[in-house]
Amino acid sequence: MEYGMERIVCLNGEVDETVSASIVAQLLFLESDNPEKPIHLYINSPGGSVTAGLAVYDTMTYIQSPVATICVGQAASMGSLLLTGGEPGKRYCLPHSSIMVHQPSGGYFGQASDIAIHANEILRVRKQLNEIYRRHLTKAHGIDDIERMMERDRFMSADEALGLGIVDQILTNRLSRDEGDGVRGKSSSPTA
């Protein structure tokens, strides 16, 4: 088997429109370069804008290249959704990673009718995000379970995220491809 350079995209910091546009462009470029070759998205993020994050998520699922996700540090809020949305079997975290999930938050002030419109929108977005988590978690969870899990901030260690099905493996070290696996979790190879 021939191995080339790892195709890396890094999400470091808050997910906003500028960061999202950069990541989307990188994903599209790497896919156009070689649609079959995996892309590795390294995540260290406290989360951020839902719409900016969903642009990245939609691009990850739209392109042909499989996108492996790796949490280094933290994947909170939208960062955890992007981590969970990686290629099945290729969602990783390092041993001291922190993962946090919760429902979307927002605030709005103005006329009562406009407040009601924004409240309905945030409820629609919450339902959409819960469905994305339900679809990607490797452990079976009903939508009611997901809603309870997302009700408040829920911080998890790497082992807890693995147990919940947010990640597939915990990477303990980066070994050469013929030295061993260097992982804890359900499958044996951290490389793609």
Image: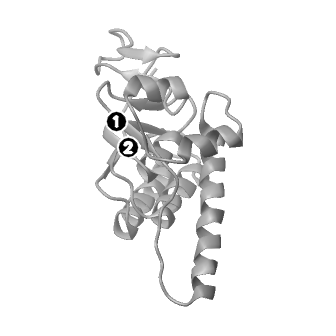
Query: Of residues 93 and 131, which is closer to you in this image?
Result: 131
Where does residue 126 sit, x and y in percent of width and height?
60, 58
Query: Of residues 61 and 54, which is closer to you in this image?
Result: 54
Q: Residues within 10 Å of mark 1 (few under 14, many from 20)?
A: many
Q: Which residue is found at the position 36% from the left and 32% from the top? A: 4
Q: Which residue is found at the position 70% from the left and 43% from the top? A: 143
**For residue 10, above or below residue 20:** above
Q: Which residue is found at the position 65% from the left and 71% from the top? A: 120
Q: Which residue is found at the position 66% from the left and 64% from the top? A: 124
Query: Of residues 73 and 120, which is closer to you in this image?
Result: 120
- Given contact means CB atoms under 8 Å apart, are the residues at marks 1 and 2 in contact? yes
**Residue 63 seen in render:** yes
The image quarter in which residue 22 lies: bottom left
The image quarter in which residue 146 lies: top right
**Residue 85 seen in render:** no
Which comes sooner in the sequence, label 1 or label 2?
Answer: 2
Question: Mark 2 highlights which residue?
Answer: 75
Give the Cα distance between marks 1 and 2.
Answer: 6 Å
Q: Amino acid at mark 1?
A: Ser
Q: Amino acid at mark 2?
A: Ala
Q: In what element is the residue under mark 2?
A: strand
**For residue 86, above or below residue 58:** above
Where does residue 132 sit, x and y in percent of width and height?
62, 48
The image quarter in which residue 181 lies: top left
Where does residue 119 sit, x and y in percent of width and height?
60, 72
**For residue 188, above or below residue 43:** above
Q: In what element is the residue under mark 1?
A: strand
Q: Which mark is residue 153?
A: none
Question: Mark 1 highlights which residue?
Answer: 98
